Image (tube, rainbow, N blue to C red):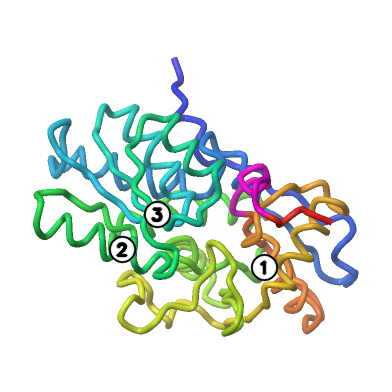
């Protein structure tokens, strides 16, 4: 008998049909929206909870708390409930309605903090409850089980599904778990594989992609594991998200548009190669925002 948890990972890798104009380079999208919780974050959420339970770090009496901008929260709500764990999720009040309601549907308590302070404010709130009220934080930003999820699954899947031929891996950087774990695995297979991180320009706000202030930089982040960082603007990310849907039939969120825009900038500089870009989640999570308005 398989459970819903068995559907996490082994997501499809599909080749770009329209967006890539360089005939000597192949561009593939890894469709993480196909995970049961609808995003790439199912992988680290499952690994963080499963590993903590197996180590005896948490049990059904533990009060879990996590700050999240959305997708991690949904994944944690889904998986914590299946493990009969109590979890409180903290996010900025300007998070989309779909995210808040999805977390609550899975049974989590959701606390909304001031949007003025963004995810940093949510992180401070969660850390205060851990320090003073006996809560336990999974702390995806400093938790090795975050990046190890991608070392164990995302990296090997990309290596397998490109027949060991991948030359470039492109990923948005938020907690940096995806890029850290996938980079570590792929570099072990072939150190020549180029790892490309995506960050927003200074004046842009792209949900799921961050340029962290130094004091909030994820502890799991190791800059040596990223060969190149490409910046994209919010306008570029928005436009490419719409093009992904219209031209490739891939309905995704803004961070996926950002990663795709970066992948196409990269491809413009290549003579040949096989590029894999992460599509982090699904677009229906953003319908109450203005992302898809004409």
| Residue 52, position as x, y percentages in the image | 21, 44
Q: Cα distance, mark 1 to mark 2?
A: 24 Å
Tell me where the magenta segment starts and ends, as one range: 280-289
Q: Nearer the viewer, residue 99 or 146?
A: 99
Q: Which residue is mark 2?
A: 123
- Tell me the quarter of the picture where residue 22 sits: bottom right
Q: Rate crowding at label 2 as few (under 14), some (14 to 19) or many (20 or more) other CA atoms within 10 Å.
A: many
Q: Which residue is mark 3?
A: 91
Element assignment for label 1:
helix
Quadrant, the C terminus = bottom right
Q: Which residue is mark 1?
A: 258
Residue 148 in view in this figure: no
| Residue 270, position as x, y percentages in the image | 78, 81
Q: Which numbered disc, 1 or 2, marks the residue closer to the eye?
A: 2
Verify whether residue 287 appears in magenta: yes
**Residue at the location (81% across, 56% down)?**
16
Q: Is residue 43 left or right of residue 135?
A: right
| Residue 51, position as x, y percentages in the image | 25, 44
Q: Cα distance, mark 1 to mark 3?
A: 22 Å
- Choose the circle earlier in sequence order: 1 or 3: 3
Is 197 placed above or below 207 here? below
């Amino acid at each position: 008998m398989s459970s819903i948890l068995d559907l996490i990972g082994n997501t499809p890798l599909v080749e770009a049909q329209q967006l890539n104009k360089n005939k000597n380079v192949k561009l593939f999208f890894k469709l993480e929206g196909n995970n049961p919780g609808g995003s790439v974050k199912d992988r680290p959420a499952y690994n963080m909870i499963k590993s903590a339970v197996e180590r005896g770090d948490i049990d059904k009496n533990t009060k879990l708390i996590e700050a999240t901008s959305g997708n991690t929260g949904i994944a944690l709500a889904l998986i914590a409930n299946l493990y009969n764990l109590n979890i409180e999720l903290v996010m900025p009040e300007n998070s989309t309605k779909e995210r808040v309601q999805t977390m609550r549907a899975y049974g989590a308590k959701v606390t909304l903090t001031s949007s003025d302070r963004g995810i940093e404010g949510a992180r401070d709130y969660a850390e205060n409850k851990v320090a003073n009220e006996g809560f336990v934080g999974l702390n995806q930003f400093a938790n090795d089980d975050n990046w190890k999820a991608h070392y164990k699954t995302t990296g090997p899947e990309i290596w397998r599904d490109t027949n060991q031929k991948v030359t470039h891996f492109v990923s948005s950087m938020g907690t940096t778990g995806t890029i850290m774990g996938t980079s570590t695995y792929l570099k072990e297979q072939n150190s020549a594989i180029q790892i490309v991180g995506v960050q927003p320009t200074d004046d842009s706000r792209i949900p799921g992609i961050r340029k962290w202030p130094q004091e909030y930089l994820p502890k799991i982040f190791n800059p040596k594991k990223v060969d190149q960082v490409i910046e994209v603007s919010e306008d570029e990310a928005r436009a490419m998200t719409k093009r992904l849907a219209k031209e490739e039939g891939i309905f995704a969120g803004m961070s996926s548009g950002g990663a795709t825009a970066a992948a196409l900038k990269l491809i413009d500089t290549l003579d040949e190669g096989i590029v894999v870009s992460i599509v982090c989640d699904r677009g229906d999570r953003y319908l109450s925002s203005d992302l898809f308005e004409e």
